[in-house]
Image (spheres, rainbow, N blue to C red):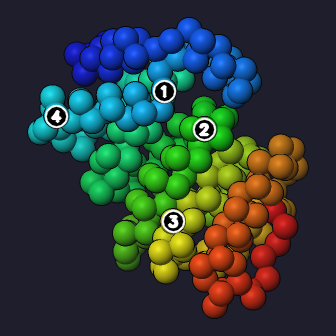
Amino acid sequence: MTEDADFVAAALEREGAWYRAEAERERLGSDLEFVGASVGAVRGTVRDLGRRRPGMTRDQAVALASELWRSRVYERRLAAVVLLQEHVDRLDNGDLTRIEGFVRDARLRALVDPLALDVIGPLVERLAGPARARADAALDRWAGEADVWLRRAALLAPTRPLRAGGGDWDGFVRRARLAQAAPRGGHDVVREAVERVRDVVQGTRPDLAADPVPDG
């Protein structure tokens, strides 16, 4: 491992507890390894890394996230997500390909949802012009994929921008229709995402709430 990855791994091991590891493994039903570090400890570790490496570049952050993700330790993968969240303002359209790989591999709400809500959504929302068009095309493709986790990520991505008064509602409706028409299987994963965004809009954007949204 690189020095930064080793720092993160060692810190998470120190913060771990066997009883939390067992509880998380049972809660998530995953075959990943768990060290039992809390979400707060994961976030604190990434903050400590930022203080230790204040000059970390975007490329270094993305490379480190990829290295942490290659591990089969859940908390290291979560640290990779948090690291991307910390650097999201510097990510661009080209990073969606790497993030797509993370989503395909994650297969857990606890990893896919923060990637969609706090990385993919904000990344896409601040793009403009051809870069935004390419990102929108990528999310449209995800919405029609057989992989239900990619469909979920595409649907959840605009949640925070929509809540804040922005977001691409028309894009969400289009992707909800694509997701509904995509091959079935794991349908609850997609339906939850549609209902979650629809609930946000009904509560905060009554101007949009009357628009028809398919049932995911």
Q: Nearer the viewer, residue 5 or 181?
A: 5
**On the rendered structure, is 161 left or right of 11?**
right
Q: The residue under label 1 is which amino acid type?
A: Ser
Q: The residue under label 2 is which amino acid type?
A: Ala
- State the separation of the CA atoms marked 2 and 4: 26 Å
Mark found first going from the N terminus, 4 or 1: 1
Q: Residue furthest right?
A: 184
**On the rendered structure, is 18 left or right of 60?**
right
Q: The residue under label 4 is which amino acid type?
A: Arg
Q: Nearer the viewer, residue 79 or 153?
A: 79
Q: Nearer the viewer, residue 171 or 141?
A: 171
Relative to 33, residue 81 above or below = below
Q: Residue under circle 4?
A: 51
Q: The residue under label 3 is which amino acid type?
A: Arg
Mark 2 residue crowding within 10 angstroms, few (<14) / some (14–19) / many (20+) = few
Mark found first going from the N terminus, 1 or 2: 1
Q: Secondary structure at mark 2?
A: helix
Q: Secondary structure at mark 1?
A: loop
Q: Secondary structure at mark 3?
A: helix
Q: In the image, residue 117 lies at what x, y percent?
A: 52, 55
Mark found first going from the N terminus, 1 or 3: 1
**On the rendered structure, is 185 left or right of 156?**
right
Q: Which tag is nearer the camera, tag 4 or tag 1?
A: 1
Mark drawn on residue 160: 3
Mark found first going from the N terminus, 2 or 4: 4
Q: Residue under circle 1?
A: 38
